[in-house]
Image: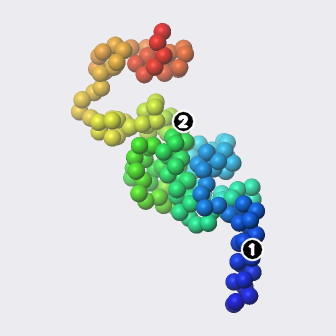
C-alpha cells in the first residue's frame, strides 16, 4: 500500500530528474526520433505506443501530452490527422484527438500523394475540402482558363505544374 506509493514516487522523481518524463514533446522531435523512416502513415494508437515502447524517447506525463504533439505536428505541416470522417490540416482546429486505431497520422507528402490535400498541403480556401467541391472551378493564374490548359509538363525547377509553380521562368 503506502510503501508501494513511496517507491513509485521515488522512481517518478528519479525519471523526472533525469529528464526522462516530459510535460510537452515537440512534434519535430517526435517525427525525427519516434517515427520510423519507412512509414508514411500510422495510427494514432501506434504513435502513442511508441512513447511507452522505445527507451530513447521521453515518457509523457499524461496522454494529453501526446495529443498536443499530434495537434502541433498538424499545425507545423508535418502530418495531417484523419479521424475517419475528416482530414485535418494545419489551419484547422482539432478539438478532440483520439489515440485509437481508427485515427491516423499521415505525413504531409503522403497526404499529397493520396490527394487528401493540394500541393501546398492545404484544402480549398472556399469550400474547405480537397479535392475541391466548389461549384466554381478555380481559374489558373498562369493560363487564365478553367480548367487549366497549361498542365502539359512539370516545371523543371520546382517539379510542380506550371499553374502551381511559384518560380518564374
Residue 137 drawn at (x, y percent): 28, 27
Q: CA distance from mark 2 to mark 1?
A: 41 Å
Compared across the picture, whether 148 is left or right of 65 comes to left
Please state if 121 lies on the left or on the right of 148 as rendered. Answer: right
Foreground residue among 89 and 84: 89
- Closer to the camera: disc 2 or disc 1? 1
Q: Residue at x 38, y 37 (%)?
A: 123
Q: Is residue 150 above or below residue 27?
A: above
Whether the residues at callouts 2 and 1 have beta carbons within 8 Å, the answer is no
Quadrant (top left, top right, bottom left, bottom right) of the N terminus: bottom right
Look at mark 2 in the image and give the residue it sits on.
109
Residue 4 appears in which quarter of the rendering? Answer: bottom right
Residue 161 position, x and y percent, is 45, 19
Picture residue at 75% right of the left edge, 74% below the top: 11
Q: Residue at x 43, y 47 (%)?
A: 88
Image spot of residue 15 (x, y percent):
74, 67
Local SS, label 1: helix
| Image coordinates for residue 66, horizontal then vertical, percent | 57, 58
Q: How is the image coloured?
A: rainbow
Which residue is outermost to the front? 17
Q: Residues within 10 Å of mark 2 (few under 14, many from 20)?
A: some
Q: Which mark is residue 95?
A: none
Q: Residue furthest left?
A: 135
Q: Is residue 35 visible?
A: no
Instruction: Tell which of 115 and 96 is nearer to you.
Output: 96
Q: Secondary structure at mark 2?
A: helix
Residue at which label 1 appears: 11
Q: Quadrant of residue 91?
A: top left
Report the side of 73 relative to 21 (left or right).
left
State whether residue 73 is above or below residue 12: above
Residue 19 vs residue 75, the one in the foreground = 19
N-terminal-most mark, 2 or 1: 1
Amino acid at each position: 500500500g503506502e510503501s508501494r506509493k513511496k517507491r513509485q514516487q521515488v522512481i517518478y522523481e528519479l525519471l523526472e530528474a533525469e529528464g526522462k518524463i516530459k510535460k510537452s514533446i515537440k512534434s519535430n522531435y517526435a517525427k525525427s526520433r519516434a517515427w520510423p523512416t519507412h512509414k508514411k502513415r500510422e495510427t494514432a494508437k501506434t504513435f502513442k505506443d511508441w512513447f511507452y515502447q522505445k527507451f530513447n524517447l521521453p515518457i509523457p506525463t499524461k496522454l494529453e501530452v501526446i495529443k498536443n504533439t499530434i495537434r502541433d505536428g498538424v499545425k507545423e505541416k508535418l502530418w495531417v490527422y484523419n479521424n475517419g470522417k475528416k482530414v485535418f490540416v494545419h489551419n484547422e482546429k482539432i478539438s478532440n484527438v483520439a489515440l485509437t486505431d481508427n485515427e491516423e497520422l499521415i505525413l504531409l507528402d503522403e497526404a499529397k500523394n493520396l490527394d487528401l490535400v493540394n500541393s501546398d498541403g492545404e484544402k480549398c480556401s472556399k469550400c474547405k475540402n480537397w479535392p475541391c467541391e466548389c461549384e466554381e472551378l478555380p481559374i489558373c493564374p498562369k493560363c487564365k482558363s478553367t480548367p487549366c490548359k497549361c498542365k502539359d509538363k512539370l516545371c523543371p525547377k520546382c517539379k510542380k505544374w506550371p499553374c502551381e509553380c511559384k518560380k518564374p521562368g
